[in-house]
Amino acid sequence: MARSIFIFVIFFLISFCYTHVRSNDQEGYITVDISNKGLDFLKDLLIEKAESSLLPLYLPKIEKAVKIPIVGKVHMVLSNITMERIDVISSTVKTDDNGILIAVSGATANLSMNWKYSYSTWLIPIAVSDQGSATIRVEDMDIGLTLSLKNLQGSLMLSVQDCGCNVKDISIKLDGGASLVYQGLVDAFEGKIVSAVENAVSKKIKGGIVKLDSVLQSLPKEVPITNIASMNITFVDDPKLSESSLDVEIDGLLSAKDKIIVSNHYHKTLQASFSYREVDKMARISLHEDVLKSASAVYFKAKKMHWIVDNISDQSLLNTASWRFIIPQLYKMYPNDEINLNISVSSLPTIKIEKQQIDVTIPLDVVIDVLDAGEVIPVAGFSMVISASISAEISGNTLFGRVKLNQFSMSLKWSKIGDLHMRLVQSVISTMLKTVILPYVNVQLRKGHLLPAFHGYKLQDTQIVCVDSWIIISSDLASAKRFRIA
Ligand SMILES: *[C@@H]1O[C@H](CO)[C@@H](O)[C@H](O)[C@H]1NC(C)=O
Ligand SMILES: *[C@@H]1O[C@H](CO)[C@@H](O)[C@H](O)[C@H]1NC(C)=O
Ligand SMILES: *[C@@H]1O[C@H](CO)[C@@H](O)[C@H](O)[C@H]1NC(C)=O
Ligand SMILES: *[C@@H]1O[C@H](CO)[C@@H](O)[C@H](O)[C@H]1NC(C)=O
Ligand SMILES: *[C@@H]1O[C@H](CO)[C@@H](O)[C@H](O)[C@H]1NC(C)=O
């Protein structure tokens, strides 16, 4: 039982691991706001990835005929021009209504190449030639990239609006038997090399973004969250870009994995706007209570919300002998027999997110089963309503929860053992709930649930806040490795 409640409580956290975006005229039930700090983190990741996937970068061969006094026309070829290394020292990311602007300034790069020349003149009728290798050092390169992020049929579409590369300074050094003449020849190629580098870098970046875009577009619109439920991660509306953040919305509702349609009876009257302010975190995920409701609907309709209680810490309570004075008829008919409680949720629980807690009201059917001579005999049925508050907390990378009982009521539905003294029964069950069941559930919740890492990254310094109808999770991300050291 504790386990099911626990799974229920952590739905929203698992969802963190699948944060992608969507939008239209409706609104999503999950919004993800990435702050400048978060964008900076993502930008660094992107550049780190780009540095390795850009290289080695092969530039096209450059040929040129150079006229040299007395000697005449010399045919020169630069080939196998390869950029092997690029170092980005400074970069920035900005967002505005136009898109996402990434700027790299003062980058350096090392290239290698082969050079070759040949000529023949009337003085020396035989063709003369020489060849060798050279290194090129790009001393100062700026790259500017403007990306637009739009919603395309529920997926994110990333496209390049503008991409420019500007090389301000290069130096070429010939290796091997190069003379000053050769150096002079190579220097004549400087302009061509600069534009070749500029073109190749921007072309490669554009190609990289196209690849990234196809990855985004191929993301599934549904991800499994538990073994029976999956979350609709269709992006709703275009991402909202402002100077302080990038906000995306996803549908976020859960439905049964096997595609049995769960009717979405939720009113789309959402607006996640809070006066609530938190310390600067990389991302803020706002989760509407309808996400929890959709999860409970899936579990309810899949008939997963029932439990047989046959093993509790104080096992003597599950014996008719313990109930001798409360339900004397029961003991008289079945002396010293074991009891099971068959508990099932009888209709959809109500879930309301209030300040600092999640209030749930769960209507239950409880049947007392007696185990007599290997037979399970239902002897009495009750309907019960439990109201409880759940609070959640994240410490390190672990989610903890706590349940507090607010209200409890029960009534007899039927009985095969005659009239029961309901006041007495209710007070005993209430005591059992408070002293046995809830403490047990809380022990389970206190053990915590380790949040999974996502592509090697983990949540760090996470805060959970509940406000009217929304759960807000603010968090930084850290690489799982760095996290361990910290
Ligand atoms: C081309 O350059 C690469 C990288 O510097 C080098 O490994 C390769 O041997 C070169 N090829 C030729 C034909 O020079
Ligand atoms: C790149 O070129 C510079 C200048 O020629 C040199 O000092 C540096 O060691 C080179 N770096 C690599 C990784 O080859
Ligand atoms: C997923 O969400 C989108 C947007 O709200 C909706 O149009 C679509 O029908 C949903 N898909 C399913 C399978 O419920
Ligand atoms: C009851 O649970 C305990 C631990 O929770 C376990 O060790 C024990 O075997 C269980 N007993 C039965 C009868 O299932
Ligand atoms: C538990 O009770 C439900 C009805 O409330 C019934 O359908 C189910 O068969 C019972 N299970 C057991 C093991 O008694």
Image (cartoon, rainbow, N blue to C red):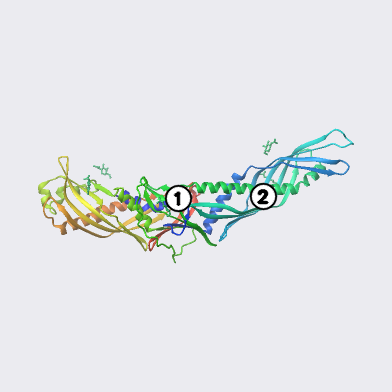
Estimate the x, y position of residue 326 in percent, counting from the top left: 14, 54
Residue at coordinates 61% horizontally, 49% vertically from top-left? 206
Residue 373 is left or right of residue 9, and the answer is left
- Residue tagged 1: 18
Q: Which mark is residue 108?
A: 2
Comes first in the chain, label 2 or label 1 = 1
* Kind of residue indicated by mark 1: Tyr
Estimate the x, y position of residue 401 in percent, counting from the top left: 35, 55
Instruction: Find numbered disc 2 in the image and state the secondary structure of the residue it sits on.
Output: strand
User: Label 2 CB, ligand 2: below 8 Å?
Assistant: yes
Q: Is residue 34 among the parts visible in the rendering? A: no
Distance CA(mark 2)–CA(mark 1): 36 Å
Estimate the x, y position of residue 30 in percent, counting from the top left: 43, 56
Q: Is residue 267 among the parts visible in the rendering? A: yes
Q: Which of the 4 image quadrants contains residue 127?
A: top right
How many circles with numbers are drawn on the protein? Answer: 2
